[in-house]
């Protein structure tokens, strides 16, 4: 029996679900870039790709060499194809303008080129997260420059989202708004092959993920919830919970997509003007779209993440996502 590659899946989607041909091409190009990033990541010390640069990104974080390389790979792969009006990245201050020599298209691509950078040098899974929006009608200003405003759309407007995880296997997880598919990179074939037909997040779980070292900074609803998880069978939830924290959102979310769980990165008291660590546009929105499409739930404690109206490109947001029962519970604790 022939195997379903990503290309074949996308062509079938074009036929059966009217996925536009330019969106199909866009996803294929992103997948090709992820293959190149996977290749670079796998070289490790042999390829001289480990370690940091002497630059900082707009968030004030020191950039790893692979953060910069992955960003460049994604820009170069996507700028000429004629599907995009512009791109935005966690690693770039301002939106990337499609060079004048290339045709422009209808979509906006946003990405976290390398998620989990702190894990690169210790050979733990990292990934790439991406989100696709339509460029609104008034996308370009009079001088043909693409402004930040075009990107400031709530997550409900995403037409596609996905991530690649560079782990023991390289996988690409994709949603076009019709469920979640998982593809595994066949290195001999050079193609992503459909291996996970319908990814579903179990409704209930006994596994949680949070950076416990921040406990003293959390707000009361999260303090309450996590203390109940830790109380186990003797506590109000009446069961024992296990904990996992990989510190790469892609890897933590991938585990949850595979076997359930709840992932939390709450806002805390350290930087009151920043609601959490994770970025709404590059991390929270695409992951929330995927989790919801897989039957899970994603909130910032107050509301559905996909409904948050972004005010700036690099905005941060608190994140609670995964198995519905637990996300509902901790969200409820925020609401009194
Ligand atoms: O350092 P901490 O608190 O464990 O934070 C880990 C979180 O930060 C992130 O690494 C942020 O992503 P980047 O590596 O893209 O900056 C998430 O992937 C992860 O969930
Ligand atoms: Mg990240
Ligand atoms: Mg990153």
Image: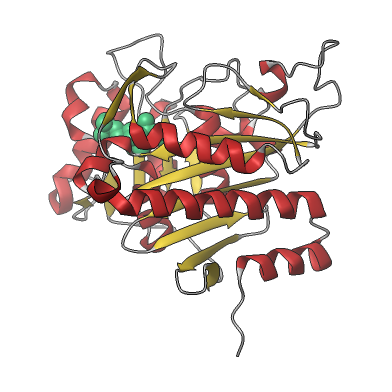
Is there any visible trace of residue 202 in the rendered image? no
Q: What residue lies at 41% left-to-right and 9% top-to-bottom?
A: 273
Could you tell me residue 302's position as x and y percent?
A: 49, 27
Indicate how the structure is coloured in the image.
secondary structure
Q: What residue lies at 45% left-to-right and 48% top-to-bottom?
A: 37
Front position in the image: 329 or 146: 146
Considering the image in quadrants, where does the C terminus appear?
A: top left
Could you tell me residue 282's position as x and y percent?
A: 52, 33
Answer above or below: position of 76 versus 296.
above
Front position in the image: 131 or 32: 32
- Say left or right for 231 vs 57: left
Could you tell me residue 164's position as x and y percent?
A: 47, 52
Res. 307 image quadrant: top right
Is there any visible trace of residue 335 in the rendered image? yes
Res. 229 image quadrant: top left
Answer above or below: position of 313 versus 118.
above
Front position in the image: 170 or 250: 170
Q: What residue lies at 80% left-to-right and 37% top-to-bottom?
A: 105
């Amino acid at each position: 029996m022939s195997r379903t590659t990503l290309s074949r899946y996308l062509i079938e989607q074009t036929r059966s679900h009217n996925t536009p041909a330019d969106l199909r091409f866009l996803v294929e190009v992103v997948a090709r870039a992820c293959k190149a990033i996977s290749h670079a990541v796998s070289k490790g010390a042999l390829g001289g790709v480990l370690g940091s640069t002497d630059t900082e990104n707009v968030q004030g974080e020191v950039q790893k060499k692979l953060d910069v390389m992955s960003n460049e790979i994604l820009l170069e792969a996507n700028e000429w194809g004629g599907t995009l009006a512009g791109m935005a990245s966690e690693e770039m201050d301002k939106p990337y303008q499609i060079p004048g020599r290339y045709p422009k298209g209808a979509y906006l691509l946003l990405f976290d080129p390398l998620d989990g950078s702190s894990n690169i040098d210790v050979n733990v899974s990292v990934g790439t997260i991406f989100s696709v929006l339509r460029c609104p009608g008034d996308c370009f200003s009079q001088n043909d420059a693409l402004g930040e405003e075009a990107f400031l759309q709530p997550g409900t407007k995403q037409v596609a989202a996905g991530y690649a995880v560079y782990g023991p296997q390289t996988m690409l997880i994709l949603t076009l708004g019709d469920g979640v598919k998982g593809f595994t990179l066949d290195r001999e074939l050079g193609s992503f092959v459909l291996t996970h037909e319908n990814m579903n997040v179990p409704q209930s779980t006994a596994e949680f993920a949070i950076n416990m070292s921040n406990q003293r900074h959390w707000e009361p609803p999260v303090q309450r919830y996590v203390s109940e998880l830790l109380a186990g069978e003797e506590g109000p939830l009446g069961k024992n919970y296990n904990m996992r924290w990989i510190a790469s959102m892609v890897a933590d979310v991938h585990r949850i997509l595979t076997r359930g769980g709840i992932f939390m990165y709450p806002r805390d008291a350290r930087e009151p003007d920043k609601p959490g660590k994770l970025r709404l546009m590059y991390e929270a929105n695409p992951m929330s779209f995927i989790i919801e499409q897989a039957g899970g739930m994603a909130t910032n404690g107050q509301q559905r993440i996909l409904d948050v109206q972004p005010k700036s490109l690099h905005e941060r947001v608190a994140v609670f996502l995964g198995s519905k029962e637990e996300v509902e519970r901790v969200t409820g604790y925020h609401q009194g």
